[in-house]
């Protein structure tokens, strides 16, 4: 097992040299020890690259663990709430893992690379937890965050861009599938996954081949509107898709101090990831009790009137007299492509059923003056953005 995953000082990804040449804003933040751009030239233009062409995001800082050994499958099946035995080689699983109280520690993707060989990817670092959970299993857990460079290649022209790189057979790849290719003597992994709710892929390669991959990708995408993007554009796209973000829509259970601040999979709308047909997994007893007795909270997707994003707003059951605060917004945005004021939030049960009407208290500032509005909102049960091209196989060329 790898000894440490804590980076020393601010790190730069293998793609930094390419990103720095395109950066005009100098708005960088720290992502688990690495420099990551908020935006490179214009967050709005970068967003439209995702929805109209191809946006490329540097995924390298995402934590990556290689899990192998005779008990790798049994270990992962015990760790996460979904049935990993159904995830065959060449497939990717979205999954959550919980503590003994059934509270979500984090979510992530698990790549079944080959028979008995897995890669677990997550935003947060979990080596200590994964190591403790491995007691009694014959597994190897290796941190490979720095060794594997990765890019998210997202948008309607992403298939055309990657096809121009000569990746034969890519059109047969279904959502949450993966394929292996050869690139300049190294293995290139391409998965049909992403964080934008659109047609898209993620590409993974040894760090020493990162710059060559970037150059080949952008050369292939010259006629397809390819652009690098930062976190701001990606965050807007993921809200439209209804995807959750740790430390925004939920707190990892191992970081909270006060009770009631973490969430279960049921409270995050992830009940479809909990498989009670499995005999045992972390948090199973607590989740079974919650399923019998009901949850405290519910995740909601809100279509809000007006065009003022409801950042950090409270949610109420009524507009005026005897109004009752029932929850709060966790992520909010004005969606350019949906032409909607959208948000994700958390409300107390039994509020928040699809079709329910609630009220959102929005404060916004213009020229130093604050304005308060009570905006009507409707709870919806579908992602705000779900184009047919997202799952079309083979994807249409653009």
Image (cartoon, rainbow, N blue to C red):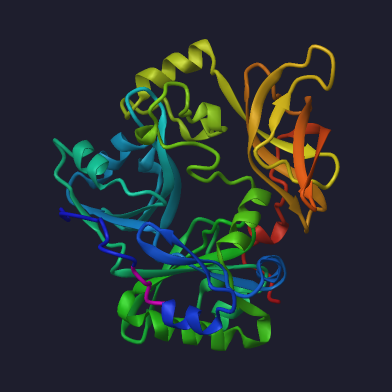
Residue 143, horizontal then vertical, whole percent = 25, 57
Was residue 196 drawn as part of the magenta stretch in this picture?
no
| Residue at the extreme front of the image, as rendered | 368
Residue 288, horizontal then vertical, whole percent = 42, 18
Q: Is residue 166 visible?
A: no
Q: Residue at x 34, y 66 (%)?
A: 10
Q: Is residue 5 left or right of residue 109?
A: left
Q: Residue at x 65, y 55 (%)?
A: 236
Magenta highlight range: 11-15
Is 24 above or below relative to 133? below
Q: Residue at x 38, y 83 (%)?
A: 183
Q: Quadrant of the C terminus?
A: bottom right
Is 298 above or below relative to 166? above
Q: Is residue 113 left or right of residue 385?
A: left
Relative depth, front residue between 139 and 123: 123
**Total labels drawn:** 0
Is 346 above or below relative to 229? above
Q: Is residue 36 left or right of residue 223?
A: left
Residue 366, horizontal then vertical, whole percent = 80, 51
Relative depth, front residue between 228 and 64: 228
Please, what is the dominant secondary structure of the magenta stretch?
Answer: loop
Was residue 13 drawn as part of the magenta stretch in this picture?
yes
Relative depth, front residue between 108 and 116: 108
Residue 69, horizontal then vertical, whole percent = 18, 51
Relative depth, front residue between 164 and 49: 49
Q: Is residue 354 visible?
A: yes
Q: Is residue 160 left or right of residue 74?
A: right
Q: Residue at x 63, y 87 (%)?
A: 222
Is 50 above or below relative to 349? below
């Amino acid at each position: 097992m790898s000894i440490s995953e804590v980076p020393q000082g601010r790190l730069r990804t293998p793609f930094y040299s390419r990103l720095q040449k395109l950066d005009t804003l100098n708005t960088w933040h720290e992502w688990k020890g690495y420099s990551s751009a908020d935006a490179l030239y214009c967050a709005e233009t970068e967003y439209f690259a995702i929805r109209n062409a191809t946006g490329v995001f540097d995924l390298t800082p995402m934590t990556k663990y290689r899990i192998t050994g005779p008990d790798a499958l049994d270990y992962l099946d015990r760790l996460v709430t979904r049935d990993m035995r159904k995830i065959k080689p060449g497939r990717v699983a979205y999954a959550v893992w919980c503590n003994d109280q059934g509270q979500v520690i984090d979510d992530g993707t698990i790549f079944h690379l080959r028979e008995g060989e897995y890669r677990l990817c997550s935003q947060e670092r979990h080596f200590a937890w994964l190591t403790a959970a491995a007691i009694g299993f014959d597994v190897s857990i290796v941190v490979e965050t720095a060794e594997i460079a990765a890019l998210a290649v997202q948008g309607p022209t992403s298939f055309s861009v990657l096809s121009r790189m000569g990746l034969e057979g890519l059109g047969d790849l279904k959502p949450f599938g993966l394929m292996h290719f050869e690139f300049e003597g190294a293995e290139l992994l391409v998965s049909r996954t992403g964080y934008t709710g659109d047609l898209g892929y993620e590409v993974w390669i040894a760090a020493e081949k990162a710059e060559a991959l970037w150059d080949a990708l952008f050369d292939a995408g010259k006629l397809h509107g390819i652009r690098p993007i930062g976190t701001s554009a990606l965050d807007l796209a993921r809200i439209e898709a209804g995807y959750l973000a740790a430390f925004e829509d939920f707190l990892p259970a191992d970081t909270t101090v006060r009770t009631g601040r973490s969430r279960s999979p049921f409270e995050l709308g992830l009940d479809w990831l909990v498989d009670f047909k499995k005999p045992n997994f972390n948090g199973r007893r607590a989740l079974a009790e919650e399923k019998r007795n009901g949850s405290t909270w519910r995740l909601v997707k809100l279509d809000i009137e007006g065009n003022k994003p409801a950042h950090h707003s409270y949610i109420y059951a009524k507009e005026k007299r005897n109004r009752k605060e029932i929850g709060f917004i966790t992520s909010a945005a004005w969606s350019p492509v949906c032409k909607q004021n959208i948000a994700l939030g958390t409300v107390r049960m039994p509020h928040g059923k699809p079709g329910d009407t609630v009220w959102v208290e929005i404060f916004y500032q213009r020229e130093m003056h604050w304005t308060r509005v009570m905006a009507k909102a409707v709870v919806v049960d579908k992602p705000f953005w779900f184009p047919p091209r997202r799952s079309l196989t083979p994807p249409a060329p653009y």
